[in-house]
Amino acid sequence: MSGSTFGKVFKIATWGESHGPGLGVVVEGCPAGLSLKESEIQKELDRRKTGQSKVTTTRKEGDEIRILSGVFQGKTTGTPIAMWVENHDVDSSKYELIKDLFRPGHADYTYQMKYGFRDYRGGGRSSARETVARVAAGAIAKKLLRRHKIQITGYTRQIGPLVAKKIDFKEIERNIIRCPDKAMSEKMIDHIMQARKKGDSVGGTVEIIAQGVPAGLGEPVFDKLDADLAKAVMSIPAVKGVEIGIGFQAAEMLGSQCNDAFTLKGKKVGTRTNHAGGILGGISNGEDIVVRLVVKPTSSINKGQDTVTAQGKKAKIRVEGRHDPCICPRAVPIAEAMVALTLIDHWMRNQGSRLGK
Amino acid sequence: MSGSTFGKVFKIATWGESHGPGLGVVVEGCPAGLSLKESEIQKELDRRKTGQSKVTTTRKEGDEIRILSGVFQGKTTGTPIAMWVENHDVDSSKYELIKDLFRPGHADYTYQMKYGFRDYRGGGRSSARETVARVAAGAIAKKLLRRHKIQITGYTRQIGPLVAKKIDFKEIERNIIRCPDKAMSEKMIDHIMQARKKGDSVGGTVEIIAQGVPAGLGEPVFDKLDADLAKAVMSIPAVKGVEIGIGFQAAEMLGSQCNDAFTLKGKKVGTRTNHAGGILGGISNGEDIVVRLVVKPTSSINKGQDTVTAQGKKAKIRVEGRHDPCICPRAVPIAEAMVALTLIDHWMRNQGSRLGK
Amino acid sequence: MSGSTFGKVFKIATWGESHGPGLGVVVEGCPAGLSLKESEIQKELDRRKTGQSKVTTTRKEGDEIRILSGVFQGKTTGTPIAMWVENHDVDSSKYELIKDLFRPGHADYTYQMKYGFRDYRGGGRSSARETVARVAAGAIAKKLLRRHKIQITGYTRQIGPLVAKKIDFKEIERNIIRCPDKAMSEKMIDHIMQARKKGDSVGGTVEIIAQGVPAGLGEPVFDKLDADLAKAVMSIPAVKGVEIGIGFQAAEMLGSQCNDAFTLKGKKVGTRTNHAGGILGGISNGEDIVVRLVVKPTSSINKGQDTVTAQGKKAKIRVEGRHDPCICPRAVPIAEAMVALTLIDHWMRNQGSRLGK
Amino acid sequence: MSGSTFGKVFKIATWGESHGPGLGVVVEGCPAGLSLKESEIQKELDRRKTGQSKVTTTRKEGDEIRILSGVFQGKTTGTPIAMWVENHDVDSSKYELIKDLFRPGHADYTYQMKYGFRDYRGGGRSSARETVARVAAGAIAKKLLRRHKIQITGYTRQIGPLVAKKIDFKEIERNIIRCPDKAMSEKMIDHIMQARKKGDSVGGTVEIIAQGVPAGLGEPVFDKLDADLAKAVMSIPAVKGVEIGIGFQAAEMLGSQCNDAFTLKGKKVGTRTNHAGGILGGISNGEDIVVRLVVKPTSSINKGQDTVTAQGKKAKIRVEGRHDPCICPRAVPIAEAMVALTLIDHWMRNQGSRLGK
């Protein structure tokens, strides 16, 4: 039972391979009556696309989105919205060389074991290129969320040992690493470029803040909001961990330090601190939702590595291709999309939670 | 759309409140022909139950499991297996005092906001007592996994600043904190008891290892094995973060350090290191699966805290009740159960992944 | 992947066997704040229960419902509602004799083939006794529907060759066959009693009318309202066919005869005839929903029949036990429950169909 | 919560409107390693397409299928298979005239009520044109079923009062009405042409036979094989009823007549008659599966009919456009597709039903 669908009420099904005809998504459950233009989707795709700066891969895909259904006279009709982008700059030649080699850190070996054979061109379905479909769907989710005054903001928080010291939302899209701390962003870019020169890659963390989420979203005991957010971001390629609010720091805290005291913010109940990251008992509490994820260094590196062949012999591999030296800046819009998809789904799931609602 | 079901093929639906008649689970999708006794389920419940040591709550529940359906002549019939435990030691009197107060760190406020009112006795459905149903279902999952030579082992890895330095599986169940490092376990217990004396609580981390998982489990691109594991453990009360393999350390690594080189282990392909925690591209690679979760300090503390009332007034609260000073030792069997439920579901989902399989 | 759950938003999971400890259901997705008493559920169960008249089986089950969770201070809490009835009058002795014989018309053979062995006591899970759980859940669905002014009414329309000629809702519960035509009900009862004397059984049809359903329920293109109703009633034991509105008569009609002309009913749009049975394009149109199902004659008959043994030898069988000579009167509340469960699920699913709704 | 997905393990999501850019489907859960060519899909689409004879609409769509993902080197990869056909012969001009009129028998009114507005061009998503996506997915289902020796055959059984008297499978595709009785097929065609001349349309029934289905498919108590088949075919536009095996005739039978006696067929257990239509207790018994559906006369007729406008005024309507005078011949491949999709899904769902299977 395959797993290319996400969400229960606002639901998406994605398809496509890195070097096939294209990639697409079918969005089901978007309410009728939402005005929607291709240009609004395109804007998000452009934030994710390749070749946008020196810290991303040089593959050049226009990633031009086309809406194929579900929109009539500029409005959503309530029926499935199909969208796709065609692949253009497909250079599969380099992949012929490695079709029998398992690239370390990649899914070559696991796809081979699961399916018996694999589309080895650019990683096929395992390529991060599949995330273009997530971002397209996420653009619709974001638009719906904005109608409910919910705003999603993502940024690079850490690159290697370098951690952002201040969080200035206006700065984020001004630098190519999408760091909210201008001074740190420059150091981060240097750090990446140095690794790239050596044929190496670097890791980092990305943080997503959702503001304006009303109290009440999340469906215990399994589909808790934090549980579904964790799944959403962990499903992004290269992510190896996720934290909500204080995250792993909670291990070293006392209850009296970790608990967020309740207080009144005007007439609304709020918390004085936000260690919980906006979620208590799996349900949003009205404070900012804070999700943090760690992105491993890009697996494709231009350095010799030990591996084995599909025929079971030892071998050396050096992955040339065109790769991002650091995934974080492009992971930002992808993670935003996954958080947005999770929130709009939960927003809709919450509608029937009590009578008269 | 409520969220008390988990899994897609091996699927569970849980129900019950802390101070209601009892708690239960319906397990759907367990294959026919598995021999199953209540005593096998009981064994796991006993590892989770209250009052088992000085580092757990003093509430005394026998947690005696009863199988109500799906088993005939000692074997599963392929139809739903219903199980439940009755609640006995229910003392709701203390909760009357706090029915209009929101306990910091608890779900009182969020349940109130979501549902308009709440069962305030012992937290109702938001109580960690609901996990008894997970552990019961997990016992069946574990038994099925063992038939496929898959073994799940969990332990407390860290308590406050104290981290286990050696991992000796045989040691785990010999100490009340379930730490695989005997020397460290004693320090951990001291640390907890000191916090308890002050009416406070402590956090920690739990690690789960799944050995013997074949390559091929996981359903990209959304139902990746790591994504579903993240959801599974994040849905456990008090968990604020989850890591797979190297986890957040990946932020500071280079690609050349982080990638696990492939090698031959006898005739099988394996990896030299296991930074990936047994999962590549969302699919198991045959190495040990490593999942780590952080458990926040128990929210119920015997200290005065600021809060507000349901009527919107400022107030002080001191939670007396009977509570675990540290959740980790009891979180171990719960996290094992969630990992087991995820793995058996994926094991079954993988069956149709290729022709002839 | 087992199939004991029904519904997507208002969702139920049932469990239990004819001769096990009992039967139950977990209802998920019922909104918080609905007042709910066991006696309201009981009322519906009493309409379904055995031994209620000479045209039903003599097995005597009190079918006393017990609510185990999800209700606090007389109101639903929004969390799963677990209910069960214990089995009391269990007489498995007769079944020992036929444990290796496949009863014609029953599921003995197919369960054996699917699961490799079976609970042969009273048919185990394949017994119509499982429908007690459906009726319990359906009672909640009906209560919710009534809040939306939707009323479900079921009756026996045909027994053997005898068809009700008038439809008087007030008459239905006054006769033991649940026929809305008093004169015909007496003939139907005679017809059944004569078959019973000969050890035989009779078939019939049941009709369910849902009044007050607003236009707009149903989710094309697969989860059309008629499609989900068809599934719902076809899943009831012994049902072999289902019609919506005009049903099979449509085969012999012209388009100009079959189409229902639109007209104005006060300010509302309505149709002059209702051949469509209240559903157009899979969506309710505001007219009465009309669902008709055929119930085969009870398979258990006290007559010699040819069969084979589990060991593959020819044999004769005569099913003694205690059985309904005609299923229709007890099928009425069961079919009502299934229609109610389908409608409330679609009512809730429709909530997000357009912005501002 | 929208409903354009079908199936649980072999799962499809369809999209597209009658007069939009095209229609498509994403097939998830098809095992890796199946050889698959566009020409195999095309063959089934050609059986469904418009303009194939004088008893079908004159709209001319090539319905050329294109596979966009999930196939590599001629074999399925185990990842989602996206396919689509572009719309070409789109003539929306006639629909401008009726954009404010509700066509009797159509979904214009109900879509308007559900979604607040609608794509009125050719019925938008409610058009039977959406079934092209079902047939494309069904072609893959059929291919998988043939590997398991399961064969699906459909035909027109009845047109108006004319019922096929013999069932000769070889005859079916030789006549334009797809009737297995050659002599009757000619009368049926005459009957349709006479109605067409008068601007009218006719109804009929379609029968689908699945041969070679092993005993054991079906998931009680809700996802019974007959329940899922009923849903599958009832979701086809214009279908108003469905029968399994003997169907509505069961109402007039005695148990002793209706029960199918078990017997030995070689070493296999079989039944002497097949009133059950191959399904007992919701599980296949190894006999032929027999599904019958009634198709109402085409709603679009070239005759004046009463209706109302979107503004709530009485009006007359005459639907000109290009329409099938009888839906049956084109309903045959659509119904086959739906039966095939249901069977392959259940085939895959049954895999985990017992240990060692």
Image (cartoon, coloured by chain):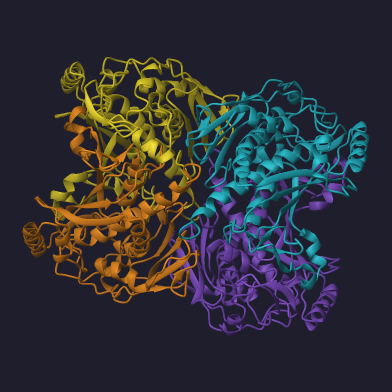
Chain colours: A yellow, B orange, C purple, D cyan
Q: Picture coordinates of residue C20 (x, y %)?
A: 51, 76
In the image, B100 versus B141, the foreground residue is B141
In the image, B44 versus C185, the foreground residue is B44
- Asked if residue A84 shows in the view, the reply is yes
Asked whether, in this view, residue A79 is left or right of residue C257, the answer is left
Residue A170 position by quadrant? top left
In the image, D80 versus A223, the foreground residue is D80
Residue A286 position by quadrant? top left
State whether residue D319 is above or below residue A113.
above
**Which residue is pictured at 62% across the width and 78% down the height?**
C98
- Asked if residue C268 shows in the view, the reply is no
Q: Picture coordinates of residue B151 (x, y %)?
A: 29, 56
In the image, B333 versus B216, the foreground residue is B216
State whether residue D47 is above or below residue A190.
below
Q: Picture coordinates of residue B202 (x, y %)?
A: 14, 56
**Which residue is pictured at 70% across the width and 39% down the height?**
D334
Q: Picture coordinates of residue D315 (x, y %)?
A: 82, 34
Asked whether, in this view, residue B185 is left or right of residue A287, the answer is left
